[in-house]
Image (cartoon, helix red, strand yellow):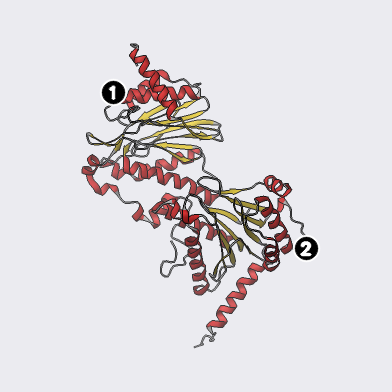
Amino acid sequence: MFSEGGTVPLQGSYQGSSFFELLQVEHDHLLPDLSAWGESAAAMIPHGTTVLTMKFGSGVLVAGDRLATAGHSVASRDVVKVFETDPYSVMAISGAAGPCIEMARILSVELEHYEKLEGEALELEGKANKLSQMIRANLPAAMQGLAVVPLFAGFDTRRKTGRLWKFDITGGRYEEGEFDATGSGGLYARESLKHGWRADLGRDEAVKVAVAGLTAAADEDRATGGVDLERGIYPIIKICTSDGHEDATEEEIAACYRSILEARAAGGNL
Amino acid sequence: MSMPFYVSPEQVMADKAEFARKGISRGKSIVGLEHQGGVLLMAENATALYKVGEIYDRLAFAGVGKFSEFDQLRKVGVRFADTKGYAYSREDVRGRGLANAFSQVIGDVFTRENKPLELEIIVAEVGDDRYEDHRNNSLYVIKYDGFISDHPGFCAIGGNVEDVESVLQTDYRDGMPVGDAAKLGLRALSAGAERSSELDAGSLEVCLLDRERTGRKFCRLSADEVQGMLDGS
């Protein structure tokens, strides 16, 4: 970027406000083309499994279990799949862990970069759109099995409401009005959310519904971690409202999970 | 065939320096001050075209001179810092590296181009108590020819910089509360300002690098907040 032989150093070849495009144009070695790795890589590297998101009374909630798998083995028991991308947005990832986590990092730098250069933050919709362009750029790698399938949610400070989006591997962006879940256990989590979710859930109720959703996913999908009381590993649950971010505490999640276990022990069908 | 006139390199440099200085001396001043809770940057600027800006977690930028030129430079700095922080870690983005990079760019333009950059900038860095060797604040000043200097405690750039600096020199104390630093900044800027204009909270642009914040430590104060700071005892 600085003084490359002969050019006027002030004028880099990229002059826009996007960090992702800056990397593409001037630092492409920091954005390797993963499609060259072929399908064999997809089986070897860790994959993240189940993440879910829902609207509730005062904002949105995003939750993810902590397990990553490589083939049929556990790759990590305490991987983080839910990221704060800026003070009012959260991204949750499922799919090939390496590219997914990198995409979350780039998105969070992207949003900060734009805000610093332009003097104001992007609208929530603009942030979701930016993410969809990044997923689209990853399409060649996705075709080789290194798919990035995130969920994106946040609090829209202009419309004063929580909003959430899901994506497909081509960068298709679909806004959802209620809830969604993705990853290997996403189907089961969604099924559980369908029963517990209401538009006017309070914050604590929303956490309960999220824990139930992840527990259902862990029950039916072997690759989903759920709550691990023995090791003390808890899902990450982030709540985003007009006040910004907040994490559900481990104690809170453990209490929700214990009440599910008790209901089960009492013969309930949970 | 006409021959170009010979002009000695000394003359070329002197002319360019003269030209740049003329551009800068017309501008208003900016002061940077260390205080108890971090670093304060204060500019005489009532417009919406900001002269002070955020670069990274612990780094801020301030420029005087030609707006388009120093704002362009600020953007170059943000790109530099964000790329470096992405490629390495956020803690690896340091003030000295950034100040040196700025000095290189400005110096390059001064020697290679016909027209030098008509600007002077401050790079401010606030310390971070989490790391043994990151605790100190730093203030760097870079001039139109790329000359870089390090200023413990306080610094000033802009038009009437001597008048501003002399106030700072007399009254600056290490570890001042932020309110005192703001009052001192206002006194110093008033000493440099044109006599006709009376400076107040509305004609100041004040930004802080706040040691206590986590992550991005830069914050811009509203006129009310500035007034509150100047009123406080």
In the displayed structure, B39 sits above or below B146; it is above
Q: Secondary structure at mark 1?
A: helix
Q: Quadrant of the C terminus of chain A?
A: top left
- Residue A269 visible (yes or no): no
The CA distance from mark 2 to mark 1 is 78 Å
Residue B137, position as x, y percentages in the image: 55, 57
Q: Secondary structure at mark 2?
A: loop
Residue B140, position as x, y percentages in the image: 55, 63
Extreme residue in the left direction: A40
Residue B160, position as x, y percentages in the image: 69, 67
Of the numbered discs in the image, which one, if any, rests on residue A220? 1
> Which residue is at the front of the view, A232 or A31?
A232
Of the numbered discs in the image, which one, if any, rests on residue B195? 2
From the viewer's perspective, tell me whether residue A251 is left or right of residue A78.
right
Of the numbered discs in the image, which one, if any, rests on residue A37? none
From the viewer's perspective, tell me whether residue B187 is left or right of residue B119.
right
Q: Amino acid at mark 1?
A: Glu
Residue at 67 percent across and 66 percent down: it is B161
> Which subunit holds the residue at mark 2?
B
In the displayed structure, A86 sits above or below B23; it is above
- Residue B53 visible (yes or no): yes
Q: Are marks 2 and 1 in contact (CB under 8 Å)?
A: no
**Residue B151 falls in which quadrant of the image?**
bottom right
Q: Amino acid at mark 2?
A: Arg
